[in-house]
Each structure stands twice: as structure tokens, then as C-alpha cells.
Amino acid sequence: MRRPAAALLCAVLLAGCAGGAGERPGAADGRAQDPPRAEGDTRRPPVVDHIPTREPVVFLTYDDGAERDPRFVGLVRERRLPVSMFLTDSVVGPGYGHFARLRAVGASIQNHTLDHPALRGLPYAGQRAEICGQQHKLRSRFGISPRLFRPPYGTYDRTTLRAAADCGITAVVLWRASLDADGELTYTRGEPGLRPGDIVSVPAGETMSPSLTERTVRLLREIKRKGLRVGRLEDHLEGHLEDHRWDHR
């Protein structure tokens, strides 16, 4: 993304993290945790769980990096899936090679902190260390500086947004739909059912069954049944950052 997005705020209602690392600290209400922007405050990237679009697309996102199913690389390659992987360094551990293979077949790599803490309420220095620290890790591993960030558990505050902006983040990405372990989709807000522009979180864990590949295949069937397809989050998000159009519902 080429233009700074700090002046484009969209706080949305969201639930706790669907990722596999740690336990949920409780339900999160994005409206309560993110106070109104002070006049002249331009150091805050937008927070999104849905991107307004007329295209029949949804966006698949995966957190943490705990589950490294080798068949998933083949699935992404064969179906040319533009998935987004939000990685936590302490969870990925020695598994960065798996995500390098995913990146080589079209997945994007994004930031999910160094150690997966609940950021809301932490001091600026701690939040910046978590976000910038993972930026440095991903830069050293892949030679990239991610522009997207997902806070663990979906919880954040004004300090999170300031720290994210200072680390080079242009958008904070949450989700409107999440895939349960039993394969059912749940929604953080609005009417149930996938709709164009939805950001979907697919949880991952080392011991989850069915496998990440199997869960994704089932989800792809549901996406197709709804007349939708998987879009590249970064491309659509960049377009709306340029246009200054955001979904406040």
C-alpha cells in the first residue's frame, strides 16, 4: 500500500480472537475499546472486519501459525487461493519454512505480534515492542514489511492503533465471520450468512481435527454455494484506502 492510512478510521464491533494461541480473555466490543478520535489525531490506521465491494468475494485469513499441514500448501497452490497468514513468532517457532512455501504459492504474510498477548491496556512501549518486533522478524525472514496487523483476540485500544501506525501498519484487520471447529460459521455482528466483502477467520491449532486443509475445503464449498469466491485481501483493502470508503455498519 502506497498511501498512509492513518487518517482513515473505522472502528467496528468484533468478538474475541479465533486463533489457536492462548485462551480468550473474554468477549471484545470494538466500539467500547476504541474511544472517538481526538481532533487532529492522524496516527491511527483503520480497523476493518468487512470491505465494501460489489465483487462476489470474501477474504480468508489464518492466525498464529500453529498448524502446519503440508497439504495446505498444495491446496493453496492448486486452487490459487490468495489467503492471508497473520503470524505470531512464538507460535511459529522453527516453522517459518512452511510459511515461506506458502508465500511462494501466493499466500501473503502479515503481523500478529511476537508473543500473542492481549494488547488492550498495555503501555505504548510494550505494544510497540510486540508489533514492531514482529515486523523486524518478518523482515529478516522474508524481506518484507507487512502493512496489515491483527491484534490477538481481536482486542485493541487507541494505544494499539498508535503503535501499529508507528510500526508501519496501514490497516488493523479483524473479522466478521469465524469458522468453528465443527465447521460452522459464526458472525460477530449483522445478519448471519456470508456476504461480499466479509473477512473470514479460520482458526488453526496443532491438535485440531479435521485438519486445516479439510476445514478449508469445506469452507470453500460453502463460499461457492453462496455464489462467492476468495479474493485477495490486500488488493481490495488498498483500493478502499485509496477511495476513503468504509463500512460503518
Image: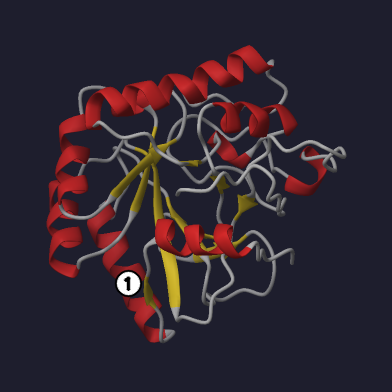
Q: Residue at x 42, y 54 (%)?
A: 181
Outermost top residue: 125
Classify residue 249 by image quadrant: bottom right
Q: Amino acid at mark 1?
A: Leu
In the shown orientation, is residue 247 left or right of residue 34?
left
Count of marks, rendered view: 1
Mark 1: give few (<14), some (14-19) or many (20+) Cα within 10 Å: some
Q: How is the image coloured?
A: secondary structure
Residue 158 visible in image: yes
Classify residue 155 by image quadrant: top right
Against 224, residue 36 (above or below) is: above
Against 219, residue 87 (above or below) is: above
Q: Residue at x 54, y 35 (%)?
A: 152
Q: Residue at x 26, y 64 (%)?
A: 81
Classify residue 160 by image quadrant: top right
Q: Nearer the viewer, residue 139 or 4?
A: 4
In the shown orientation, is residue 85 left or right of residue 124?
left
Q: Residue at x 41, y 48 (%)?
A: 203
Which x, y percent locates residue 166? Answer: 58, 27
* Residue identified by numbered label 1: 220
Residue 176 visible in image: no
Q: Nearer the viewer, residue 37 or 201?
A: 37
User: Which secondary structure lies at badge 1?
Assistant: helix
Outermost front residue: 3
Which x, y percent locates residue 219? Answer: 36, 69
Against 23, residue 179 (above or below) is: below
Which x, y percent locates residue 103? Answer: 21, 46
In the shown orientation, is residue 203 left or right of residue 4?
left
Which x, y percent locates residue 133? Answer: 44, 19
Against 23, residue 242 (above or below) is: below
